[in-house]
Image (cartoon, grey):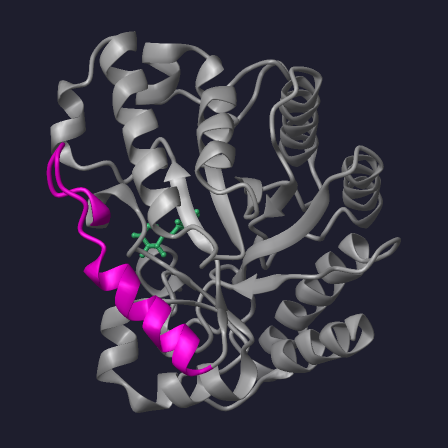
Amino acid sequence: AAITLADLQSDVRLREAVNAYCTQIVPVYELKWRTLRPDAHTFAFEKADALLDFARQNRLTMRGHNLVWYADLPEWTAQIKDARSAERALRDHIATVVSYYRDKLTSWDVVNEAIPEFPKRPTERRDSLWLSCLGSDYLRMAFGAAADADPHVQLTLNEYDIESVGERFAARRAALRNLVSDLLDTGTPLHAIGLQSHLHGEIEIDTDGLAKCVAEFRSWGLDVIVTELDVDDQKLPGPVTERDAIVAKRVNDVLAAISSEATLRSILTWGISDRYSWINQMFPRADGLPNRTLPLDAGFRPKSFMDVIAKFTREAV
Ligand code: XIL
């Protein structure tokens, strides 16, 4: 599960839940630029280190999220306006952070969310500081720098809204396919595709489209992992039994599609208890009922979501 240091420190039930159910964690904020980089010369590793200590004390592994993203950049990065300073900042960040955690993390999201929200063409890349200063070369640069700094860690390209039925999702799969094939053609050290799997409760999973896309990535030698699973239940019916059943079905369908032809080795949920979910802030329900997006409810009781996860993790063992 993804966790924040603040929640972990303030709630013993969260610590117990992570210990009872999880084998790995990923920091929600603590490895993002905004936390790690108060200014252009400083690296503030304390919070991420505290999470790594917690992981090690409890025999959990930790993933890294993330090195390059269009979002959550600290204000000082607005000073970066040309290719030279962008390349310097990107290389400095990746070299320093990835070598600091060398051999300590299992996997890194090297680039997060690199394709546009609504791609008009598969060749389109998402607008960002990095794209505007460096063009799409920034992706190859980032993966290369990460591989130089830690030759053992799994290097991942992480993407959202790949999983569901509809034109927009199909266009996003096509854009991701184009990007991945481009990176591999140019010899980029890319090892895995992360499917965030922030699912939409009201939209079915495109099991065929997704299984095909995943099979193709695997045929190219890539691993496919689930990195941020949760279900936005904002538009689902209110009654809890009905709502939980739809949430569990979306989770089941996405995990079944991804594991239809090969073992799914890594599933991370974006939080573990409904008490601590970004969906509460981002997608609250109009009827005021609490969201039910994660494997445990706000009182840390397991829901059918947890049974589905248990089924797939048993199959993988
Ligand atoms: C989210 C956090 O959970 C929020 O609290 C924050 O306000 C924004 O970022 N995709 C990602 C994650 O890759 O980093 C995002 O995390 C959720 C969407």
| Residue 240 appears in the rendering | yes
Q: Quadrant of the C terminus?
A: bottom right
Residue 128's image quarter? top left
Residue at the spot 41% in from the left edge and 90% down from the top edge? 16
Residue at the spot 41% in from the left edge and 74% down from the top edge? 55
Residue 24 left/right relative to 193: left
Q: Position of residue 307 (x, y in %)?
A: 68, 82
Residue 207 left/right relative to 56: right
In the displayed structure, 213 sits above or below 307; it is: above
In the displayed structure, 263 sits above or below 174; it is: below
Q: Position of residue 154 (x, y in %)?
A: 58, 47
| Residue 117 appears in the rendering | no
Q: Which residues are magenta?
A: 36-58
Residue 37 lies in the magenta-colored region: yes
Residue 243 lies in the magenta-colored region: no
Q: How many marks?
A: 0
In the displayed structure, 285 sits above or below 181; it is: below
Residue at the spot 62% in from the left edge and 31% down from the top edge? 168
Q: Position of residue 261 (x, y in %)?
A: 88, 53
Residue 74 left/right relative to 2: left
Which residue appears farthest toward the right when viewing the image?
261
In the displayed structure, 252 sits above or below 103; it is: below
Which sits in the foreground, 73 or 187? Answer: 187
Residue at the spot 70% in from the left edge and 80% down from the top edge? 310
Q: Position of residue 254 (x, y in %)?
A: 72, 57
